[in-house]
Image (spheres, coloured by chain):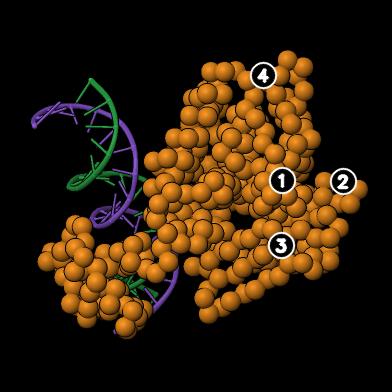
Chain colours: A orange, B purple, C green
Amino acid sequence: MGRAPCCDKATAKKGPWSTEEDSKLKDYIEKYGTGGNWIALPLKAGLKRCGKSCRLRWLNYLRPNIKHGDFTDEEDRIICSLFASIGSRWSIIAAQLPGRTDNDIKNYWNTKLKKKLMAMTMTSQYQRKPPPFVSLSPLYKDCTNFYTPTGSFTPFEPMSSLQPDPLNNDNTTLAANSSFIHTPESLVSYMQYYPAKENFLMFGSGEPRCSSSDGSSSHISYAREIKQEDMSNFQGFGASNGYEDNLKFMLSHGCTSTGGEDVNQWTEKPSGYNLDKDLEDVKRLISSSSNNSCNENFIDENKTQGTVMYETTDCRCNIRKI
DNA sequence: AAACCACCCAACCGCATGTCA
DNA sequence: CTGACATGCGGTTGGGTGGTT
């Protein structure tokens, strides 16, 4: 036997919410909370809605401190950076942007930000010149382990040997000594000029999750395996582009030693590797870096909220346990 | 002023996973 | 242990709106 029947979907009201419904829901939740039971809530609140619909309305619109309207450049950068790192995990991305909902970010990405990136890609292609590498954002100025073309990735060839800049006449490696930052511009340029080696398109997380005083750091990145035949048409990226089946996560125990030698150790995770479920791996990363005098950072495992937060002085990663 | 078009975004849908009887 | 239901998530849709012809 299962549970008691769910709400009657045949009679549940659908479509846009009226102001009356909004205030009923808002009043009820402010007074009594959700009670951890969305299915029972509409009946108690006097609404002819499905619990699922109530939950969505509350989370995306009525919840306090919801921010609507234009996204800032900073928010753009964060979204791009996280998208490059974890793909369309909107709920995780939303967790990094206070006041923004996953739905908001998803819509913003699909309607504006993605187009912005596409436009930049097209512009760069037509102009046949390298897109600009942008100076480091103040936010990231202390991050030392950006995913640069000079990085070394044990299972693959060092990035420095992967792709000489195809458009530079002098055939030098593009931005070989530049720090790489995740602005839309840099994201596009990275994807364009380092698209694949042996069927891998490599993305870096950008920010080290933990950086220590000796300069070592850890971060999570992934490589997305792509089909060679798709490369000629490759202009964008995303979870719905058909590549997700070939997604492979690379968990980096990455460190750059004081001598500048890259001692990254990469562990390939199977397709479908779930960051949220492999918190132990993440913890190991953090703790291994902690052994290297990582005293500016902390791990705060808040079990009541089901989250584990890893924070550095300049970068933050908040990974939810499911 | 009307028709058309493109865009935005709130809401729905379906799936995966967790929970409970 | 099993299966029905709850929850949360990402993808998709379609009505509303503003701009253009």
Upstream in sequence: badge 4 or badge 1: 1
Viewer-side label of 3, 2: 3
Upstream in sequence: badge 1 or badge 2: 1
Going by the numbered disc 2, the residue's amino acid type is: Gly
Going by the numbered disc 1, the residue's amino acid type is: Phe
Q: Residue at x 67, y 52 (%)?
A: A139
Residue A167's disc number: 4
Q: Give the spatial CA distance, label 3 vs label 2.
A: 22 Å
Residue A48's disc number: none
Q: Give the spatial CA distance, label 3 vs label 1.
A: 16 Å
| Residue A177: image location, x then y, percent | 79, 35
Above or below, C18 against B6 in this view is below
Identify residue for label 2. Answer: A260
A249 or B8, nearer to the observer: B8
- Helix, strand or loop at label 2? It is loop
C11 or A84, nearer to the observer: A84
Identify residue for label 1. Answer: A146
Task: Name the subunit of mark 2.
Answer: A
Q: Give the spatial CA distance, label 4 vs label 2.
A: 29 Å
Task: Answer few, some or many: residues within 10 Å of disc 1's Cα (few below 14, many 20 plus, some between 14 and 19).
Answer: many
Visible in this render: residue A92?
no
Going by the numbered disc 3, the residue's amino acid type is: Thr
For the residues tagged 1 and 2, is the chain the same? yes
- Helix, strand or loop at label 4? It is loop
C-beta proximity under 8 Å, tags 3 and 4: no
- Helix, strand or loop at label 3? It is loop
Q: Give the spatial CA distance, label 3 vs label 4.
A: 38 Å
Task: Answer few, some or many: residues within 10 Å of disc 3's Cα (few below 14, many 20 plus, some between 14 and 19).
Answer: some
Going by the numbered disc 4, the residue's amino acid type is: Leu
